[in-house]
Amino acid sequence: MLRVSNLKAAYGKIEALHGVSFHVEKGEIVTLIGANGAGKSTTLKALMRLVPPESPSVTAGDITFNGVSILGMDAHRIVSDLKMTLVPEGRHIFGNLTVLENLQLAAWTRKNENIDREIHYIFDMFPRLAERARQRSDTLSGGEQQMLAVGRALMTRCSVLLLDEPSMGLAPLVMYDMFRTLKRLNAEGLTVIVVEQNARLALQVADRGYVLDTGEIIAEGPAEDLLRKPEIKAAYLGG
Ligand SMILES: Nc1ncnc2c1ncn2[C@@H]1O[C@H](COP(=O)(O)OP(=O)(O)O)[C@@H](O)[C@H]1O
Ligand SMILES: [Mg+2]
């Protein structure tokens, strides 16, 4: 469905991706793992076609969705037409708005459409958000803020969810909970692309994985194979 071929991307003159290739099929959970600075966020930004300067410019290669290049496509069409939505690193929720207001705001493009169904679905998926619907978002815990960031992405009715380090800053139990929810969303039809420094956790829920090292894919395969590979264990899984 989504295919990245020999992608090179740069910030100004500095190349961050040196020819990255991977693919994601409908219904999969695919993870990109790698150390800090490997190019994980750059890859997601390139996929979402965000506008510079936050986003890198693609200097070579291609990104196709169902066989059609999306390199010339605007970010808003990636969301509205391809149904791909990014949960960015750091969550970027509006702290001075309530949980419910954050969710409603995420559906602003849909004008007068009925959004109760999505809100209901998200509150069912994340009961803690339902309990805190009228609470200001900056009073939520880190885990609850991550839930809200995912919930907000789901308000776009996306079919492909891209997540940038959802486990960042969360306590282990909260992380497991988050990944269990991703698995449940996936079982209900959502395609998931998740980039993580927490390689073990990501590989435990993913179908397939790619290992990114300084802008290059150095290993790939079924997640269970990567979890067993000695060189991956040594470098990324704490031995
Ligand atoms: N806005 C930017 N301007 C210049 N260089 C950047 C920018 N964002 C990231 N980089 C560089 O690109 C490389 C990849 O970064 P990034 O994709 O953020 O890595 P990761 O998400 O894997 O930690 C790093 O060398 C980083 O310093
Ligand atoms: Mg990053």
Image (cartoon, helix red, strand yellow):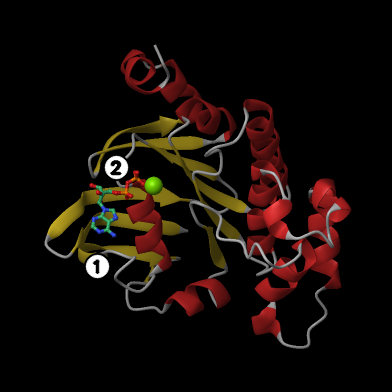
Kindly identify the amino acid type of the residue bearing the numbered disc 1.
Ser
On the rendered structure, is 214 left or right of 136? Answer: left
Question: Exactly how many numbered labels are in the figure?
Answer: 2
Q: What is the x, y in percent for residue 137?
A: 71, 58
On the rendered structure, is 13 left or right of 226? Answer: left
Q: Residue at x 31, y 17 (%)?
A: 231
Q: What is the x, y in percent for residue 109?
A: 64, 83
What numbered label is drawn on residue 144? Answer: none
The residue mark sitting in front, 1 or 2, is 2
Q: Which of marks 2 and 1 precedes in the sequence?
A: 2
Q: Which of 126/26 is in front?
A: 126
Q: What is the x, y in percent for residue 122?
A: 78, 57
Kindly identify the amino acid type of the residue bearing the numbered disc 2.
Gly
Q: What is the x, y in percent for residue 111?
A: 72, 87
* Residue 114 in the image: above or below residue 33: below
Q: Does the residue labelled 1 lie within 8 Å of ligand 1?
A: no
Label 1: few (<14), some (14–19) or many (≥20) C-alpha neighbours in 10 Å: many
- Residue under circle 1? 57
Rounded to the nearest whole Å, what is the CA distance between mark 1 and mark 2? 17 Å
Q: Is mark 2 within 8 Å of ligand 1?
A: yes
Q: What element carries label 1?
A: strand
Q: Which residue is drawn at 56% across and 46% down?
A: 28
Q: Which residue is drawn at 24% across and 65% down?
A: 58
- Residue under circle 2? 37
Q: Quadrant of residue 65?
A: bottom left
Q: Is mark 2 on a helix, strand or loop?
A: loop
